[in-house]
Image (cartoon, grey):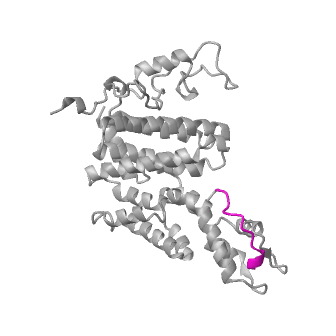
Amino acid sequence: MNLSRASPVGQCLDMCPFKERKQREQQGRLHKYEILDGQWTGRGQRLKRLPLADPAKTVKEYSRPAAGKELSSPRDLRPSSVLLKTVQYLLFEVWDRVIDSDSVSLAEAYSFVFDRLRAVRQDLTVQRIRGHSGALVLEGSLGFLLCSPYLVRELPLGSYDEVLHANQVRESFAELMECYRTEPKCQREAEFQALLLLYDLGNMDTLNRALKLPRGVVDSPQVLIALAVNRAHLEGNWTRLFRLLRRLDCLQTCAFYRHLPKIRDRALRILTHAYNSRNCRFPLDLLAYLLVVDNIEVARQMCIRRGLSLAPEDQQSIIFYKTSFKDLGPEGPGKEGHLVERKKGDFTWAEIMLGEDEGEFARSSKQLKSLY
């Protein structure tokens, strides 16, 4: 047996290794979420002296692999139990506390949580943690990665790198699928197989792989509805697609969210050709219902933006006339009252990200506590 190739086993029981914590403290590189209370002025400026790190709040930051840089020291790696604890801390104690704050605080929290979750996945990769332990950590991380594009939709472009975020989603899904192959009886496998289908809408490789999943997964309610959404999309049956979207839960809708603008734009194009007539009147309330937008005004503005006219007699109907249709592309991402907010209900966003099923969440938390 070649022991030199054995994977390192993490020995760090804190969210951040002692060496890194002290180094960043001395270099003034602590994030404001990581310092001891009372060391930040009211205006958000640092004190003259360098702030001290709070060991209970400091979280290991992502470090790019570089030549000669040691990333596999057991003292700097966190075992799976600590990684799970870190994910839960980031979502409950950081993200949930700022979700209703101003855009500056939200941008800071997103950047912090995104980076620290990236470091979590790096520790998983270095240790080659797979199976149930790896799945629990990746599922929580993916919950954040799938929901946050909806939650940070109004942030300035510089605060949210869509390409980098999408790359992290895909890499996390790839590692999670490997965990499921290693240990096929993970509790939430069907849920995340469905989330991948919704995120990768219309991707034939993803569809073909899903159809080869074991029975019990491929015929689960979550996967079946995700397959139905993909089929409606590939067939161009957008009416059925929107009906199916109403049946998705909050996390599933967030996984699909990035496709909504294009789907609605395509539906309006089809309607413009199907009802192309100066004498035809299409009710705005029906249009709002079919496209699952929050109200008539949203539907009205979508049409006006594309050069379509309102019925002069009542302003409550739209005239679909294809020669006046302006090809301006999809709408920007916006708030979704019907599709997201109502489904979220009374759960916090951290609970949605970690699995809104209270039984599963309780089991995960109980398992975590038993490891300490």
Image quarter where the N terminus lies is top left
Residue 136 included in the magenta stretch of the image: no
In the displayed structure, 215 sits above or below 58; it is below
Whole-percent x, y for residue 345 in the image: 53, 56
Quadrant of the rendering where the C terminus is positioned: top left
- Give the answer, above or below, for where 328 lies relative to 347: below
Residue 325 part of the magenta segment: yes
Where residue 236 appears, as percent x and y from the top left, is 54, 75
Tell me where the magenta segment starts and ends, as one range: 316-334
Residue at far top of view: 49
Asked whether residue 360 is in view, the answer is: yes
In screen coordinates, is 8 left or right of 176?
left
Q: Is residue 157 above or below residue 270?
A: above
Residue at the extreme front? 67
Q: Is residue 348 visible?
A: no
Q: Quadrant of residue 60?
A: top left
Viewer-side residue, 146 vs 6: 6
Task: Please state which of residues 121 and 370 is positioned toward the viewer in this rendering.
Answer: 121
Q: Residue furthest left?
A: 1
